[in-house]
Amino acid sequence: MSTSRPERGERNRDSVYIDGRWVASTGRRRDIVSPASLEVIGYAPDGTPADMDQAVAAARRTFDESSWSSLPVTERTRYLQRAGELYADRAGELADLITAEMGSPITFSRNAQGPIAQHILAYFTALGGRFDTEVNRTELSLPATVIRDPVGVVAAIAPWNYPQALLLMKIAPALVAGCTVVAKPSPETAIDGLVLAEIFDAAGLPPGVLNVVPGDREAGEHLISHRDVDRVSFTGSTQAGRRVAEICGRDLRRCTLELGGKSAALILDDADVGATMEGLRDGAFRNSGQTCTNQTRILVPRSRIDEFTDAICDMVSSLVVGDPFDPNTEIGPLVSERQRERVEGYVSVGQDEGAKLAVGGGRPVDLDVGWYVEPVVFTGVDNAMRIAREEIFGPVVCVIPYDGDAEGLAITNDSEYGLAASVWSTDDQRALGVAKRMRTGMVLINGVGGSFDAPFGGFRQSGIGRECGIEGLLAYTEPKQVPLFQSK
């Protein structure tokens, strides 16, 4: 049964988006609860395996039978360009919605959540304009034309912490490549995922090219194991990523996995205290600590341990915890009660391991409603402790002392993860030399870096493959060679 498109600004959603239509879900309705007020702010469908079957069937049929994949790339990018224009028109609404759904501080939502998503759309629109799907290679023993075919039907699964940007990292390059997509937003941020569908629908995207079905883990697992899905792009925890890889490996289905992190901020012995604290204020606590690239292991030279520890504790103590809709708030609530319990559990683990709880760790006394936790600094941490090795995904940092650049670099690289890191120094060339020896997918120097035009992803258990950059686009293609016949 088809239903009408929701009114703009309306938070309640009854339908999923399949084959260019708003379709009643076969699942139940899920209430979306504000993590700050614990009030219901709207509802959305909780998609089912049956919904996913419909969505995959639409995407498969569109890819196999329509002209979408054979359109010139420049024509496909026109839809992205129009979507970008419409997105800009609704950016304020989406920022408010993300803050309401998952508690991202409103200033961060307005300055990062929406703008990053818009940048990704604009980047892949521009990249599509100069992307060659056929390249002649005349230097080969047998000259060939290498053709980049679209991989087919893509399952795009994104979490709740950056719900728009992480979905668009998958949707935008897949559409440029000529694929069709079934996108599964997280249940916690289902409403804004469906608003994204409204934007692409209003941009005139042909039916079946993009299908959006929010759902839980069961629906997601059904999607990634579907025989008509050619590629899976997943962002989430390392534990969930292992399950995705297991399923994809069984069927030899292509996959990109962007998973967890336990990033190190390596402060060199010549670093400026004030500049470093200013950078780590955001770099370690972005999005209330719910960012996979946050620098949560702060490595400090032992020769300056007291100076930097005092500065870190002072900085963290000054972070403003409060209502996520207050523009001054830096740390909002965690996304769910389960997430707060996870963070509080790690606070207990750290103390049991012998680390010193130097700042925070409790619940703010003036915020008796909402899933809040005070930002935390642990000192006296050894890199072998669980709080230094496992991703906590909350506003918790560990201060780890080291002696000399070699040991600092060794501790940085001594991790199951390898998503991001940073180096802090007044000597850029020295910092660059250290950065080149870090085994991680992204390194910031004095807070500079993190381009969404460059490949994003991680080493080791931080994932497989890359998103963004030309690498992110090529992931949605299959190369094939055909003979190159020179014209006479």
Image (cartoon, grey):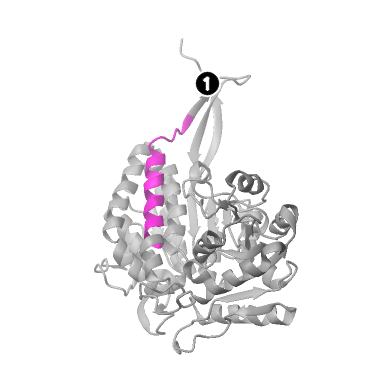
Residue name at image x 64 percent, y 58 percent: 266
Of residues 63 and 285, the one nearer the viewer is: 285
Q: Is residue 124 magenta?
A: yes
- Which image quadrant for residue 352? bottom right
Which residue lies under the disc numbered 1?
484
454 versus 211 height, above or below: above
In magenta, the rendered stretch is 113-134
Amino acid found under the numbered disc labelled 1: Leu
Predominant secondary structure, magenta span = helix
- Visible in this render: residue 399? yes
Left or right: 263 as drawn, with respect to 177? right
Rendering coords of residue 382 (x, y %) = 74, 69
Q: Is residue 96 magenta?
A: no
Of residues 170 and 47, the one nearer the viewer is: 170
Say few, some or many: other residues with alpha carbon within 10 Å of mark 1 (under 14 / 14 to 19 / 20 or more): some
5 versus 427 height, above or below: below
